[in-house]
Image (cartoon, helix red, strand yellow):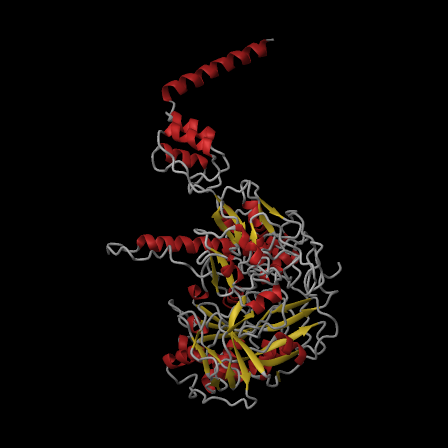
Amino acid sequence: MSTFLQKFFYGGIHPDDRKVSKESAIQEAPLFPTYTVPLSMHIGAPAKPVVKPGETVLKGQLLAEAGGFVSAPIHSPTSGKVGPIASCVGPMGNLIPCFTITSDGNDTAAEPMPALDPKESSPADLKKRVGDAGIVGMGGASFPTLVKLSPNKPVDTLILNGVECEPGLTADHRLMLEDPETILAGATACATILGVKNVYVGIEANKPDAIAKMQSLASKYGVQVCELRVRYPQGAEKQLIYAVTGRKVPTGGLPMDVGCVVSNVGSCAAIGEAVLQGKPLYERVTTVTGRPVVNPSNWRLRVGTTYGQAIALAGGVSEDPAKIISGGPMMGFTVYSLDVPIMKNTSGILLLGPEELHQFEYHPCIRCGRCNDHCPMQLMPATLGTTAENARYDLAEAWNATDCIECGCCSYVCPSHRPLVQFIRRAKADIMTRRRAAAAAAKAAAAPKPEPKPEAPKPADAPKPEAK
Amino acid sequence: MTPVIVLTVIGILLALAIGLVLKFFGAEVDPKVEQIGALMPGANCGGCGFAGCNDYVNAMVEGRAKPGLCPSMNKSTLAKVSEILGVVAEEKEPRMAVVCCSGDDNHAHRSAFYNGVTDCTTANAVAGGGKACPYGCLGMGTCARACPFGAIEITSAGIAKVHREICVGCGKCVAVCPRHIIKLVPKKVDVHVFCNSPEPFKFKKGVCTGACIGCRKCVRASKPGQMNITGFLASVNYDDAPDASVVDACPAKCLRLTDAPNPVPVHASAPSLAPTTGKPAPAIEPATK
């Protein structure tokens, strides 16, 4: 076992991990009669539909192509008929456009893309495959992987994120145990694309079986397994880079600024499948867990399965849940409908029982400084919270609110139960809106305007789509 | 006694010094600025398009702006300002803000129990703040706090209401509403569509009993062009507004006069709706502490 000493990032917390489903093997979900497939399952432009309502599609067939550089295509989870584009409730509570696929019951697969070799194929081919298969970051952020694999700065290190520091979630853990070869094949493909030699797999020490499994294959694939001390939020990109390589991503920077690319093991498994089997991304491993769930377990669910169906697969609930969370308890989003579909980034569905869910009134900051001690980004959440509470977003910007990774450590430790992350999120939204407006204004001012066209619309006045 | 004398002498000397400095080095201020400044409302609402009252006064005196842009200035004050400036004022049509939503707690469905920060913009980012309709008023008073004139009230039924007699139409609330449901309309028009959801009829009826159902009865009851329908949402043509009698045609009662109360539904046809007590009805009960 590789025991070279990893650095330990500042701050963080250690909540009870409650990984009750870690012994449950990944199960295949049965075929459901309908699937609700959202058009926007990634950060960036929504995908553009290429099939018409009423058309018959096969499993894995392209439904919508990437709508821009930062975008990803979408593939059908089963064979059947495409319904009209409707809207469904997304995990963020907003209505998002979606396809409804009515299954024909045969689950006929489309012709897979030709298999590639993760080591020998050309980087361009592999990169195109990652884009064509619609791979996005499956740890939660759903950032298109193709963009991540196209850095415009020199990169020398690829880090696989098998940390899974969120309490309750075990999807990545099970994947590392059951399908490590696919993960490492995907990692090899990423390494070929990026042309890097150093590939690390970061795993927390609370998953010794996964570490042993990865270790046994490490020499075959030329990766180094790093056992990391258990601390939330170790799985955050910047914290993981620091823990593994000791490099610090500068304020406002990206991992590529320090020569790193971080990819979740789930995404690597999807890349592995896309490269070896030519299979696009239309299903993922999701943990269904929580005290009210009868059988907390891990499932290979197709995109478009609803939360209700997923919970029913896990045996339903033994008591009325008080809260349903998409993702983990620290950074997940509370959903209010069971009709929310599983998306490419749904790593878990967590249910909380009534006695687990504490509701507090929040009180003024007592300036105890606990949040400062625990903030892994070394910000001052108390100051950010009060500035945002008083709508002084300019001050929040001066205190680097935009560096907040919204991990929730500050809210977790706050003795006044202040919703600090919510305050900071509000400030960040305001800062980003202002920056975008300033950038648009600067662009409009810098644009050459010698053409004497009276009808030329000014970019600043063009109606902008409502940003959510 | 000595300290009193010493302090008095110092005071007199300093006063003389200030007076002399002002006389010889003082910056000249156009007397018009002071005269007009005294007439301005001083709310710094920004409705004129300038950074505040003082900025606007300077702009007027320097000839960069015309009088009459201030939304809260009445006719006689405007006449005085024009007289000081020596120009003829162009009167701005008085406008007011209208919250285009009927979804108070008597009508709109709650999708979840929200107990976070009481601010619409913040709440809107968390699963829509617990309101089932993604276009409805959240009633957490972000607009009311932004209003420099105190013209917006959050009613006991949990919805924002603009008071016509106080509102000057500066548009500050329009800018802060995260759901973009506040509109600036000419004050003389009395008929408004109190719904802003373009979603299909089926969806709207599932989340709110006060929604516009797109039945076109108002279009037929008014002259052509006075009422328009886009998708499932009616809108008033504010350049050629229908007269007040058109509201009787609306079966959903979302086409109302500015000050008309939103009628409480008498027959509880939909059991999933909030009770008519004005309290929010959480779909998921809050857990006990």
Between B233 and A59, the residue placed more toward the observer is B233
Q: Is residue A389 visible?
A: no
Q: Nearer the viewer, residue B41 or A301?
A: B41
Number of marks: 0
Q: Position of residue B257 (x, y in %)?
A: 56, 50
The percent coordinates of residue A16 (x first, y second) are 68, 67
Q: Position of residue A77 (x, y in %)?
A: 52, 82
Q: Which quadrant is the N terminus of chain B positioned in? A: top right
* Along the line of sight, the residue nearer the viewer: A371 or A349: A349
Pinpoint residue A2: horizontal percent, then vertical percent: 55, 75
Q: Quick check: A84 left or right of A16?
A: left
Is A4 in front, or is A351? A351
Indicate left or right for A411 with A57 as reference: right
Q: Is residue A307 above or below residue A334?
A: below
In the picture, the quarter occupied by the C terminus of chain B is: bottom right
Relative to residue A240, is residue B51 depicted above or below? above
Q: Quadrant of residue A231?
A: bottom right
Horizontal side of A11 relative to B40 (left or right) equals right
Is residue B190 shown above or below B202?
Answer: above
Residue A426 visible in the snapshot: yes
